[in-house]
Image (spheres, rainbow, N blue to C red):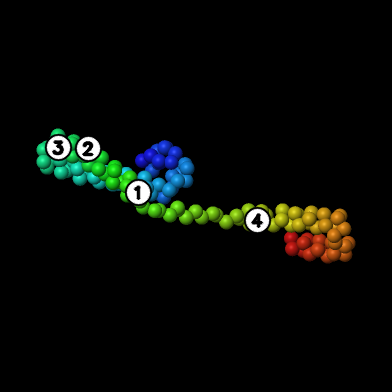
Amino acid sequence: MRCSGCGKDIPFNGQVCPYCQRDKSGDQMIHSVLVVFTLIGGGVGYLLNDFIGFLVGAFAGAIIGGILGVAASSSAKSKPPEVRVAPDNSAAAVPTQSRSAARLLELDELKAKGLISEAEWSEKRNALLRDL
């Protein structure tokens, strides 16, 4: 099956094109209706006039199926697929020692800027070192 958005070959299953992330439910509907009508048309043609009837019936069924598939897919209002974003676990992946080191550096910066006193710095630094 080809994506009508980017034109690349894509698998039939799934909700979105893996390349352009376009909703492909309309493309699936066209494809399914086209195949069903081609088979029905070919079967009816075969019953009426053997192999030549099969070819003519399949061709007529494909045309009718294509038209009906396009009409059905354009009239069907499909909602876009739900996109789920994985939670950011980068803080959990950082080892405790590097987080503690970053907090110690931050504490030193606060002291250097004069935002905390020597006593506060010493108290917080000792608490961080105890937690290691």
Q: Amino acid at mark 4?
A: Ala
Identify the disc placed on residue 59. 2
Q: Give the mark nearest the N terminus, 1 or 4.
A: 1
Residue 11: tell me if it is visible.
yes
In the drawing, does residue 85 fall left or right of residue 65?
right
Specify the label residue 73 is tagged with.
Answer: 1
Residue at mark 1 to residue at mark 2: CA–CA distance: 21 Å
Instruction: Identify which residue is drawn at 45% across, 44% down.
Output: 18
Write down the residue under mark 4: 91
Tell whether 126 sits left or right of 27.
right
Q: Is residue 79 above or below residue 8?
A: below
Residues packed near mark 2 inside 10 Å, few (<14), some (14 to 19) or many (20 plus): some
Find the distance from the CA under tag 1 to the CA under tag 3. 29 Å
Image quadrant holding the N terminus, namely top left
The answer to whether mark 3 and mark 2 are in CB contact below 8 A is no
Q: Observer-nearest residue: 102 or 44?
A: 44
- Mark sitting earlier along the chain (1/2): 2
Give above or below for 9 relative to 29.
above
- Asked if residue 116 lies left or right of residue 52, the reply is right
Q: Considering only order in the chain, which callout, 2 or 3, is on the residue closer to the N terminus?
A: 3
Label of residue 107 in the image: none
Dot 1 or dot 3: first in sequence order is 3
The part of the image, by quadrant, that contains residue 122 is: bottom right
Quarter location, residue 8 = top left
Q: Give whichever of discs 2 and 4 has the lower sequence position.
A: 2
Query: Looking at numbered disc 2 in the image, what kind of residue is underneath it?
Result: Phe
